[in-house]
Amino acid sequence: MHPPPSIAIIGAGPSGLLFARLLEVNGLKDYVVYERDESSIPGPWQQGGSLDLHGPSGQQALKEAGLFEEFNAVYARWDASRVHILRSSGETVGRFGEGRDAPEIDRLQLRQLLLSSIPAHKIRWGHGVRSIDGRKTNSPDDVGNGCVIHFSNGNSATGFKLIVGADGGWSKVRPLISTAQPVYSGKMYIEGTISHSNASYKAAHELAGPGMMMAMGPNKSLALQQGADGTYRMYFGVVVPEDFYQHRNSSATEKSEAVRQLMLSSEKFYANWAPQLKAIAANAEGPFRAWSLHYLRPEEVGWKRDAAPGVTLLGDAAHLSTPFVGEGVNCAMYDAVLLFKRLRELFGKHPDIASVQEASLEEALSSYEEEMFERGRDLIRRSAESEEVLFSDNAVENVFGFVDGEHEELLYDVKASGGK
């Protein structure tokens, strides 16, 4: 019987797959990725939207993994960074972001790029984690770190030297080392689509083009974003209770129509918005899906290394934030780069994690986490600040004030044309 791999990566999202790619391309092939999806073929509710990859983080991560050239040649949409800002009256406030170093890529395209870069047999599909038993003793006779992973399909696995939780905001790995739990932000996006044959497609294209349109009113927004296939995703951005609308499956048609009618008829939502904006929402194709926005409290991001030796986290599992600075996937991918670099320093040019002493591994993990905690807390705080502005009573007037110095040059013409 073959011994188990030394590294278990939980979750085949961007950070988990990027970390696997970094291991693979650098000769450390003693790993396995466990993923709850049954296969690489996504279901109708696993599509996800578009992501912008930033130069110092997301793009740099792809360069470290030897994937940037393929990304740039095949997937990157450099013309999709423009954002068109409107008032709820339909009046254009301005456009910004053109030429920004933040090309878009669809989530599924990023996943496919990463999946195709590692051997198929390294992924264990249909292995959603049900629970993980923590290490029970500190005996040197323990195999690996002593943790036992129990999967929803009835299987289990143990004997790993390192377990990396890259399994998102509702991580099954995080409870091993932290008591932090996601908190609902009070904000929700409710998503529909505008296909090529949709009656509002022309209007959507005129407003958003290859990028994004965001119409803003008091405590709410209506957004359009183009995907790689040219279709659009439409989002109601609203302040509502967490149980307001919870449907994320294809049987939600009836309730989807009910929520659309409520959005368009209630003065609390969009009843008084411009007719052209309401028409797009009226024609958006459902069933609508709900994205309740959660975060971890920044003061709860962190743990002591002795909580669970040989266990660490990447991305949302470590520092879940709301998406209002557009850096979640970038920060997650950079986590993977940083973790790999700390391990590479430990392994040297000929890595062999199976022979590494626990104390040395813990030192490497501690070094990675020290920097990751700081970046993660900062991301959560900045996202919260942006969220407050974007959902404020005077969102249009406030939105340009929160944009930091990095983007001031992009907003110069917008400010000159009336954006305040």
Image (cartoon, rainbow, N blue to C red):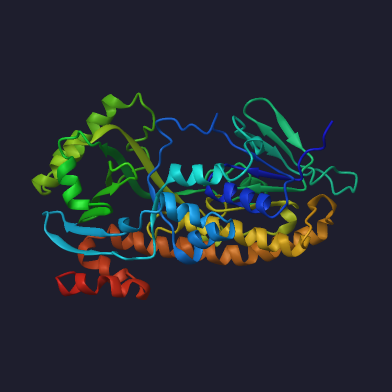
Q: Nearer the viewer, residue 113 or 132?
A: 113
For the C terminus, give its image quadrant: bottom left
Residue 259, placed above or below residue 324 = above
State whether residue 226 appears in this view. Answer: yes
Question: In the figure, is residue 65 to the left or right of 268?
Answer: right
State whether residue 321 appears in this view. Answer: no
Q: Nearer the viewer, residue 286 or 398?
A: 286
Quadrant of res 123: top right
Residue 306, placed above or below residue 378 = above
Q: Residue at x 39, y 61 (%)?
A: 102
Question: In the figure, is residue 408 to the left or right of 130?
Answer: left
The image shows residue 59 at horizontal and vertical percentages of 49, 60
The image shows residue 94 at horizontal and vertical percentages of 18, 64
For the N terminus, give its image quadrant: top right
Question: In the figure, is residue 361 to the left or right of 131?
Answer: right
Question: In the figure, is residue 405 to the left or right of 353?
Answer: left
Quadrant of res 337: bottom right
Q: Residue at x 18, y 69 (%)?
A: 419
Quadrant of res 323: bottom left
Q: Residue at x 69, y 63 (%)?
A: 342
The image shows residue 245 at horizontal and vertical percentages of 33, 36
Q: Residue at x 50, y 57 (%)?
A: 68
Residue 252, placed above or below residue 335 = above
Q: Nearer the viewer, residue 309 or 123?
A: 123
Residue 188, placed above or below residue 408 = above
The image shows residue 331 at horizontal and vertical percentages of 51, 59
